């Protein structure tokens, strides 16, 4: 199919599709930035994130569709039974061990 045969309507749809795709990519970028900011600055209420009553965080949680105390298992200390927030990343044989400051491994693997 030659592009010369595409009628105006199809060209218009193609243009709108590209505009929608660009907007979609932009929204995904904004959402990722907002999630990252919330994960960095929201308060820890074991085991999840909460706004602490700060209006900026409340607005961000609303925009993301997050409930107050947003579950965040990826931010929970890897020590069995501990619900503290990850604050330390220690090299291990299989990557990194993510723990709270209380459960930082005493020695790294291989030493
Ligand atoms: Zn811990």
Image (tube, helix red, strand yellow):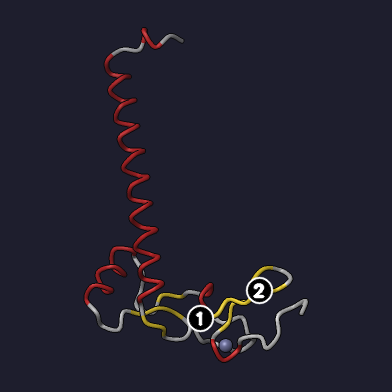
Most extreme residue toward the front, as rendered? 111
Is 60 situated left or right of 91 in this image? left
Could you say which is closer to the camera, residue 16 or residue 35? 35
List x then y, in percent, for residue 99.
Answer: 58, 82
Residue pictured at 35% horizontal, 75% vertical:
41
Question: Where does residue 89 sit, x and y in percent of width and height?
Answer: 58, 76
Who is closer to the viewer here, 90 or 24? 90
Q: What residue is shown at x 66% (from left), y 85% (from top)?
A: 105
Q: Nearer the viewer, residue 62 or 52?
A: 52
Q: Position of residue 75 (x, y in %)?
A: 51, 76
Find disc 1 in the rendering and name its residue: 87
**What residue do we see at 62% from left, 77% from top?**
90
- Asked if residue 54 is positioned above or below residue 3 in the image, the reply reads below
Real-space CA distance between mark 1 and mark 2, rounded to the nearest whole angstrom: 14 Å
User: Mark 2 = which residue?
Assistant: 91
Indicate the secondary structure of the residue bearing disc 1.
Answer: loop
């Amino acid at each position: 199919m030659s592009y010369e045969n595409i009628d105006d309507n199809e060209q218009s749809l193609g243009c709108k599709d590209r505009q929608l795709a660009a907007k979609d990519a932009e929204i995904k970028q904004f959402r990722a930035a907002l999630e990252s900011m919330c994960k960095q600055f929201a308060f820890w209420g074991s085991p999840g994130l909460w706004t602490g009553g700060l209006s900026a965080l409340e607005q961000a949680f609303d925009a993301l569709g997050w409930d107050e105390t947003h579950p965040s298992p990826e931010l929970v200390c890897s020590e069995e039974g501990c619900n503290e927030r990850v604050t330390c990343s220690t090299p291990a044989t299989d990557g990194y061990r993510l723990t709270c400051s209380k459960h930082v491994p005493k020695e790294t693997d291989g030493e």
